[in-house]
Image: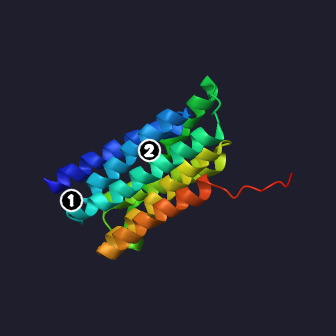
Amino acid sequence: MIESLSSFAIFFIMGVLGLNFLFSAWRINLVVLSLQFVGIFFYLTRWYPIEQSIIYLLSALFSISILGLAVIRSGEIARDLTVSQTLNRLFIYVFLVLALFLVRYPLEEFFQISRLTIILSMSLIVIGLIMAFDASEMFKRIIGFLTLFSGFQLIFMEIDQTLVTLSSQSVINLLLVYFLAHPAKQETVE
């Protein structure tokens, strides 16, 4: 049951990761990011009981709400992607997923973790990197960094399956969003 739930979570996360990579409307991105964290929550039930995994889910949803409030407060509106940009991103996404399936065996040997975690975490890391450094909007960069760190967090959580690791990864999500979404404003003296 747990194995089939985590296999479903992999396909679910990969699907919403592709949606988050393709769309640029901030409301859609935040909803899709929350679905991504729900999928990670179901994947975490491989190692942690549901009562402990919910810590990660709640902190991720709090992070998303902080990010949403920061976007509303800043008034930053994303530009729509052209058809060619969307097709280009779709091609990149499909190519990266296929490439990750090809390199999963050497990575599995190197990290000594499961094949499912390698595929999922490397997908999150690579797509997160592209989103963080390709986007022109700050909220899209923050979503990219959250996605990037989610990939690293899955690797850490499989290697060290303690409650301290789960809690520290939750705190990292909250701090990351807080400090990136609320940059220090320079005060002007009038």
The residue under the point 34% across, 68% down is 166
Task: Say which residue appears at 44% left-offset and 66% top-offset.
Answer: 171
Q: Is residue 18 left or right of residue 13?
A: right
- Closer to the camera in the image, 82 or 24: 24
The residues tagged by marks 1 and 2 sit, at their Cα atoms, a distance apart of 20 Å
Residue located 45% across and 64% down the image: 152
Label 1: few (<14), some (14–19) or many (≥20) C-alpha neighbours in 10 Å? few
Residue 41, quarter of picture: bottom left
Q: Residue placed farthest to the front in the image?
A: 190
- Residue 29 on image: x %, y %: 49, 38
Secondary structure at numbered mark 2 = helix
Residue linked to disc 2: 33
- Residue 186 place in picture, x, y as percent: 77, 56
Q: Residue at x 38, y 60 (%)?
A: 118
The picture places residue 112, in percent across and down from the top left corner, at: 35, 73
Confirm whether residue 2 shows in the render.
yes
Residue that mark 1 sits on: 50
- Mark 1 is on which residue type? Ile
- Judge whether 21 appears above or below 115 on screen: above
